[in-house]
Image (tube, rainbow, N blue to C red):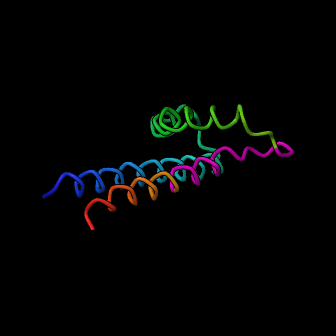
């Protein structure tokens, strides 16, 4: 196994984990889960650093928080871009 394949798999796993955490937090927040649950606090600890940075640079849209959706696009784009860079050396 070459290191490029391992790194590509690692980037994919981390990217999918980030995307899954963002989506799950959004679903749970729509379902009015208490922020006191362990699952929600863990998801909040993973995603809030991303959201807070995005919120500082993104204007609020009539009370709607778009930071999770921007974070999804950034996570997916970054995962795709890094995988593309890692695959260029193996072809």
Please tell me which residue lies in front, 91 or 50: 91
- Check the image and name the residue furthest to the right: 62
Give 3 or 49, whichever is nearer the viewer. Answer: 3
Q: Is residue 12 above or below residue 61?
A: below
Q: Is residue 77 left or right of residue 64?
A: left
Instruction: Farthest residue to the left: give it.
Output: 1
Residue 68 x, y percent position in the rendering: 63, 47
Residue 58 in the image: state x and y as whole percent.
Answer: 74, 39
Q: On the picture, is 29 further left or further right than 8?
A: right
Which of 53/81 is in front?
81
Q: Position of residue 54 (x, y in %)?
A: 65, 37
* 49 falls in the magenta region: no
**Quadrant in the rendering for residue 60:** top right
Q: Quadrant of the N terminus?
A: bottom left
Prevailing secondary structure of the magenta residues? helix
Q: Position of residue 37 (x, y in %)?
A: 50, 35
Left or right of residue 1, residue 16 in this image: right
Q: In the image, what residue occupies the spot 25% across and 63% down?
A: 90
Highlighted magenta segment, given as a residue range: 61-76
Q: What residue appears at the point 19 percent right and 51 percent down from the top-left corner?
A: 3
- Residue pictured at 33% horizontal, 56% vertical: 86
Q: Quadrant of the C terminus?
A: bottom left
Q: Is residue 70 magenta?
A: yes
Query: Looking at the picture, does residue 46 appear above or below residue 76?
Result: above
How many marks are shown on the rendered structure? Answer: 0
């Amino acid at each position: 196994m070459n290191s490029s394949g391992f790194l590509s798999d690692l980037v994919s796993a981390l990217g999918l984990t980030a995307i899954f955490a963002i989506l799950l937090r959004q679903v749970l927040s729509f379902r009015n889960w208490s922020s006191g649950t362990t699952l929600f606090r863990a998801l909040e600890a993973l995603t809030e650093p991303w959201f807070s940075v995005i919120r500082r640079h993104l204007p609020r849209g009539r009370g709607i928080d778009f930071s999770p959706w921007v974070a999804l696009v950034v996570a997916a784009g970054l995962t795709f871009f890094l995988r593309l860079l890692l695959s260029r050396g193996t072809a």
